[in-house]
Image (cartoon, rainbow, N blue to C red):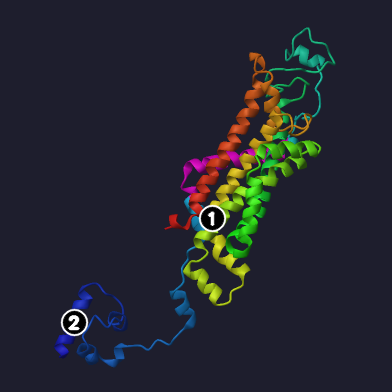
Amino acid sequence: MAHTVQDAMAKKLEEGINGSASAQFSDKDDLTPEEIAALPPDDFVLVPYNEEEAERGGYSNYSYWGSTIRMFFKNKVAVAMLAIMGTMLLFTVIQPYLPNQYDPYTCNLITKEMIDEGLVPEKSIVGMPIKNLKPNRVFWFGTNANGQDLWAQIWQGSRNSLIIGFATALIEAVVGIAAGLLWGYVRWLDPIFTEIYNVLNNIPSTIILILVSYVLSPSMGSVIIALSITGWIGMARFIRTQVLIIRDRDYNLASRCLGTPTGRVVVKNLLPQMVSVIMLRMALAIPGGIGSEAFLAYIGLGLPLQTPSLGNLANNGRKLMSTPALRYQLLIPSAFLAVITICFYLVGNAFADAADPRNHV
């Protein structure tokens, strides 16, 4: 028997298993019971139980947000769009504080130096507004019909439009998520929310925008209110549908049977399952709000004409489309509007895909 045990130990060593005999023969499937009984007791070391080490053995270093970020940065197009979007957002904040910047509301006047440098025609009159000046080294995007610097107006308009977009998306998310969760999870509230949805959804949103814009004085707050009155409906219905899908799954039933409060079930069990779709809806709501503001400006019910926004600037440039030399006043704000919309759309889609736990490995 001793010879058999020695042969077995030599065979294990030849297979490349290193360490003490306690490590070599810790698995009961390696040797037969007779061979284990024949092993010398001195080859084994009693290891005391350590609760901390036992817990560490079952620990996973998986991080939901860490995995989401890693998945997002694998999408090179989305990362490029995020860089462009981040640069534009940063520049909208710091642009007024940069040197040699003109005020977006000031009508710039012709000076003798401008005539001498050839920025304006020689027959120009000193002290008159610099109207419809083409882009040049001083006014990078040119000037408009009032002599205002279009470069400063574009960035001021981007700030105003982004404020409207972010505010609309935030209100839509807060109200829509709360209403959707209650609508889908609390059963006795379902008929109440259904009737509210049927009433508001059957009224064309364009009519509501027009009515609110007529009732309230033109301002940024009135535009945000007009866009938010019905903007939350789509989010609420979408969240309700998602809640109905996962509401009666086993882990939610088990939580309710254990007496878990409804609020905790909603926050801990339901919301984490919908992070990806919520982020996608919010990312699309921001350019949607900017586009709705541009529509209101197009029909003359948006921000006051003296308040720059991408919608107002594009609408003013639209009136000059028949003059080829002045089409830059439409093309430049339209390009900014398109870039912002595309960036938010692509980044939102990529982040929604990255936030989906099914895509994590």
Find out whether residue 74 is within the magenta segment: yes
Residue type for callout 2:
Ala
**From this viewpoint, which residue is outermost toward the right?**
127
- Residue located at (67% from left, 33% from top): 294
Q: Can you identify the residue that label 1 sits on?
A: 241
**Rendered position, 159 above or below 141:** below
Left or right placement of residue 334 versus residue 9 in this view: right
Q: Is residue 167 visible?
A: no
Find out whether residue 88 is within the magenta segment: yes
* Magenta portion: prevailing SS class: helix
Looking at the rendered structure, the secondary structure element under dot 1 is helix
Q: Nearer the viewer, residue 102 or 164?
A: 164
Residue 119 is marked as: none
Q: Nearer the viewer, residue 249 or 22?
A: 249
Looking at the rendered structure, the secondary structure element under dot 2 is helix
Q: Quadrant of residue 158?
A: top right
Q: Quadrant of the N terminus?
A: bottom left
Q: Quadrant of residue 226?
A: top right
Q: Which residues are magenta?
A: 72-95
* Residue 97 screen position, x and y as percent: 75, 37
Q: Quadrant of the C terminus?
A: bottom left
- Residue located at (85% from left, 16% from top): 127
Q: Can you identify the residue that label 2 sits on?
A: 8
Residue type for callout 1:
Thr
**How busy is the neighbourhood of tag 2: few (under 14 within 10 Å), some, or many (20 plus)?**
some
Left or right placement of residue 124 versus residue 207 in this view: right
Is label 2 or label 1 in front?
Answer: 1
**Rendered position, 106 above or below 277:** above
* Residue 291 screen position, x and y as percent: 64, 36
Q: Is residue 263 visible?
A: yes
